[in-house]
Amino acid sequence: MIQKWIAEIEKGWGLEHFDLKNASIKREASAIKTTEYKLEMEWFPAGAEMEEESNPPGTVCAEVNLTYGFLTSFIIVRGEDFRESPPLLPSTNLEDVVAWIESTTGLKCEIDFRLQMKDKDGDYKEYFFSSLLNERKVSPGGYIEVKVNKQGYIVFYSLFGFFPRLYPEITIEQDQPDLNLNKFKQKQVVLFGLPEEEGYQLLYGVEEAFVGGVKDQIVLHWNDDDPVKEIRFSDKIVGAMWEEFYNSQIITEEEMSLHIPHPDCLPIRDDEKHELLQVISNYLKVHRPKESGKWQVENIERKNGLLHADAVPINYVDRILDKLKFLYDADEHIVLHVMDKREIFSKKIEMPSKDVKVTKEEALALLEKDIFFEPYYMYDFEKEILKSTQMIDCHEFVNAVTGEKVQE
């Protein structure tokens, strides 16, 4: 299988005179937390060698999704193209780029993907596309990026994220969530702080969210009299841990046939979640001792073999300078890293006191005609289905001190 793909890419992309340096299979978690297998390949121009631990100019990197059988990326390092006879598009126009994407992926424009942005950078034209389903955006999103030089040669291609057509059929739940949209609007208009050169600006704005899909928010409480439990910290470097984890997912064709799930695709068990919440509570009790009931935990997920979680103040204004991100090894019961926003920014931004003169109700009235709901399909990771929903959004803000409207 590996040799088949190597031969196909060498012939189809003009790499007959290049030297194949590396080819490996890696196990990976997809955007919807399914296990996939990718073939990564790397070619050097004939006779070229590594330069001070860097790939030489003209290196070509390609990736194939072996699970579903299509090319996911093709990149010419540093943009120096030494291929002798690369495939040539009829032109650099959108129509020819779209036709090439359709023939390469089997996806259809305006059915599975849509142009999001195009740009021109010197001798290159760049096109960015996003995934689509029944004329709606999907979450998590999928993206395609293509860069073509003025001769019509593709020098950069990347497909990543979620394109429903590329997966086995996924059930679509068409029923809209039964929710009072006016009540939802009121909840999503929040007061927050925007850092700027001379401190911060207080604004009311709409927090993006899916109707019926607001994240779990776990408020933390602790008793001042309870003893603080010891938190174990690792002396390992996070980057080294990630590299070790990445290497552990490089496998053979024989191992691929065993269909072992990628660690990030495993559901988070109740005991793991409880343990992580206890660790975060203990940390906050030491570092924010008088703030019980003022913090909540969000975005608990597995990533790179670790549990990730955010702890944020319930008060949005406090989030200007305060937020914690935890990396936790649930197998070893040890904290790898805590990113403390207060430590990073408190010495860099002055926090002058500002009186809020605009109420939330007044801000909502000012934003009412600018708030909109965009149709979406949202993937439900627990039920493994797509749900028909809407995302609330607004490109306007209200200055909480002056009452002026501010554009995004």
Image (cartoon, helix red, strand yellow):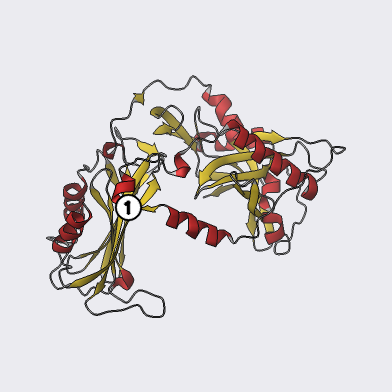
Q: Quadrant of residue 87?
A: bottom left
Q: Amino acid at mark 1?
A: Thr
Residue shown at the point (70%, 43%) measured from the top left: 279
Q: Would you call the spot at circle 1 few (<14 residues within 10 Å), some (14-19), or many (20 or more)?
A: few
Image x and y of residue 150, in percent = 20, 69
| Residue 50 drawn above or below residue 278 | below
On the question of residue 88 being in view, the answer is no
Residue shown at the point (23%, 48%) measured from the top left: 70
Image x and y of residue 166, in percent = 27, 40
Horizontally, is 304 left or right of 375 in the view? Answer: right
| Residue 386 drawn above or below residue 331 | above
Q: Nearer the viewer, residue 50 or 2?
A: 2
Image x and y of residue 249, in percent = 41, 52
Image x and y of residue 27, in percent = 37, 49
Residue shown at the point (21%, 75%) measured from the top left: 82
On the question of residue 280 being in view, the answer is yes
Horizontally, is 105 left or right of 292 in the view? Answer: left
Q: Nearer the viewer, residue 123 or 239?
A: 239
Q: Nearer the viewer, residue 186 or 370?
A: 186
Horizontally, is 151 left or right of 186 in the view? Answer: left
Q: Quadrant of residue 57?
A: bottom left
Q: Dot 1 lies on which element?
A: loop
Q: Nearer the viewer, residue 336 or 165?
A: 336
Q: Which residue is mark 1?
A: 252
| Residue 39 drawn above or below residue 184 | below
